[in-house]
Amino acid sequence: MVHPLELRDYTGRLVMNGLGRTTWAWGVLSWEGQSDDEWAHLPDGRDVHEVLESGGIDTLPECWIKVTNTGKYPDIIWTGAGLFCFVSRRLLDVLEDLRVTGYRAIPLELRPKRGEPIQGYSMLYFDDNETDEIRPYPPMNRGSDRFDTTVRVKDALAEAGVVNLEIDDAVERTRAALATL
């Protein structure tokens, strides 16, 4: 059986994700009535991961990003779960300015434990097409917390001062991941 990571050519591409530094805010996707025990189950019983993978993003209830670790607010909020890519307006502006394809941005409030909600963050929901300049990593995970992209995007993010990015060569990261299977 072929692993999803083996389905793509990653030559010349990079994998990016947020870092889980304790001095940065972390977050999770939340909604009204969410259970701590079964945090992935929506109020109607559906699993949020299955909803995202089936393309049902528009059927989610009203959601927000719940801050789970206080700290500075970075350009990518780390989730620790491998799910949900939460990005700042600054990062999104770079993608929009470059006319990058391959994602949809879903605006969400960032709700800290104390204080007022913060606007300007979005969840990236990936198209998962081979030809897009930004794609979920690994493939077939449209709600992934990481993505693969081009050097052009990396350079523009760096020039804009985007922070809290872990950046790896996609070929090397894929080779390392496949070696652990």
Image (cartoon, grey):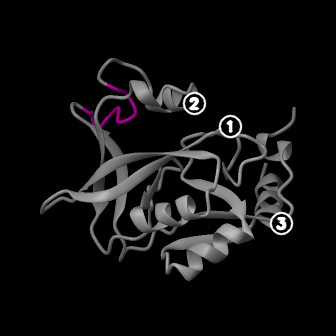
Q: What's the amino acid at mark 3? A: Gly
Q: Is residue 70 left or right of residue 74?
A: left
Residue at 78%, 40% in the rendered image:
4
Image quadrant where residue 152 sits: bottom right
Check disc 2 and report its element: helix, strand or loop. Answer: helix
Q: Dot 1: what SS? A: loop
What residue is pinned by disc 2?
53
88 to the left or right of 9: left
Residue at the far left: name it. 115
Q: What residue is disc 3 on?
A: 12
Q: CA distance from mark 3 to mark 1?
A: 20 Å
Residue located at (43% from left, 68% from top): 90
N-terminal of the two: label 2 or label 1? 2
Question: Which badge, 3 or 2, comes first in the chain's sequence?
Answer: 3
Q: Amino acid at mark 1?
A: Met
Name the residue carrying label 1: 140
Q: Which residues are magenta?
A: 34-42
Contact, mark 3 vs mark 2 (Cβ under 8 Å):
no
Q: What kind of element bears circle 3?
A: loop
Q: Please, what is the dominant secondary structure of the magenta stretch?
A: loop
Would you say residue 8 sits in the magenta stretch?
no
